[in-house]
Amino acid sequence: MKLLILTQKVDKEDPILGFFHNWILELSKIFETVSVICLEKGRYDLPQNVKIYSLGKESSDSKVKYVKNFFNLILSLHKDYNVVFVHMNQEYVLLGGFIWKILRKKVYFWRNHVHGNLLTRIAVGLSNKVFCTSRQSFTAQFKKTILMPVGIDTNLFEVDSSQQLISRKRKILFLGRMSPIKKPVLLIESLSILKDKKVDFNCDFYGDPLPGGEDYYSSLKTKAREFNLADKINFYKGVPNYETPKIYREHDIFVNLTPEGSFDKTILEAAACGCLLVVTNQSLGGEIDEKIIVKKETPTDIAERINFWLKTDREEKNRASEKLQKYVLEKHSLNALIEKFFKEIKA
């Protein structure tokens, strides 16, 4: 079987999308050839049976050029693939769907977002099957949709047994895009409450703002100073996905305030590396320990849940952490994802 992948970016150094590099690597082990069309390419290290083709964003901002390159590539490569896997971007399905039907190519569409529209429905209609990880995803409502593992590389994201537990004691982590949807301001407000209660902690924020979001990022630092948290909070730039395991392992608690509708992979990456979790995503109910999920999205409730883990003795923390690690390994590993993906396209 020969696979064509369409995705936004192939760059192992990208802090947000770098994880997809390993997905391509694992898929290359079960397909004869893998052709990848991306909007933009950066650094990659992939086997010889993988070919990367860019639509040209790294050298041009012309959307007309992107579309022209897209049609040229899917047509010129048509003998090099019989299965199409579109990752996240419905535009690829909308542009190529009818052509792939004429060429009798099977199309599998991965989309995991709470919001959708008429164009999303059309993209679903043009796909043979749709994949998502969250029951609250817009695409979860369709009969052709398959719930999938998140796809955590548990060979990379794992506990380092040689690491001293004391090195991450009372350290809190927030890692991801510094954008309003991730709600870092809410965590800063929660940490202010903990400081007022004389709770001992340190918190590291890792991540970059979205393009054009530099003012928002600056406002976070201003907010931290206004709450007199300069000695409690550190801000760091985003790092490549393959460097994040070390960061997770240096922290005791990982906080993720992304709303329901998506299953943020950083939650499971952190858990696989031994972090305890504080999340507000209610869609995770029934999936992970209820002590992890904050029922009310308020600074007070988030602060209380963080303090709960800070006060918990090490033995109970270890039990909770081991349970989370087992959950990720059994339900959401990259191996489980690849196995299920291959099973679904052969069905």
Image: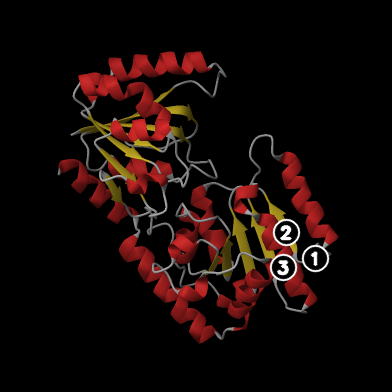
Q: In this view, does 134 lie above or below 86?
A: below
Report how far apart the C-alphas of labels 2 and 1 lie in the structure. Answer: 8 Å
**Which image quadrant: the N terminus?**
top left
Task: Look at the image and tell me whether residue 52 can be seen.
Answer: no
Q: Of tags 3 and 1, which is closer to the observer?
A: 3
Q: Regarding mark 2 in the picture, which secondary structure is present there?
A: strand
Q: What residue did someone put label 3 on?
A: 191
Whole-percent x and y of residue 266? 50, 56
Badge 2 amino acid: Asn
Q: Is residue 79 left or right of residue 160?
A: left
Viewer-closest of 273 and 163:
273
Q: What residue did someone put label 2 on?
A: 234
Report how far apart the C-alphas of labels 2 and 3 lie in the structure. Answer: 12 Å
Badge 1 amino acid: Asp
User: N-terminal of the two: label 2 or label 3?
Assistant: 3
Badge 3 amino acid: Leu
Task: Look at the image and tell me whether residue 91 can be seen.
Answer: yes
User: N-terminal of the two: label 3 or label 1?
Assistant: 3
Residue at (83% x, 58% y) in the render: 225
**Which image quadrant: the C terminus?**
top left
Q: What residue did someone put label 1 on?
A: 231
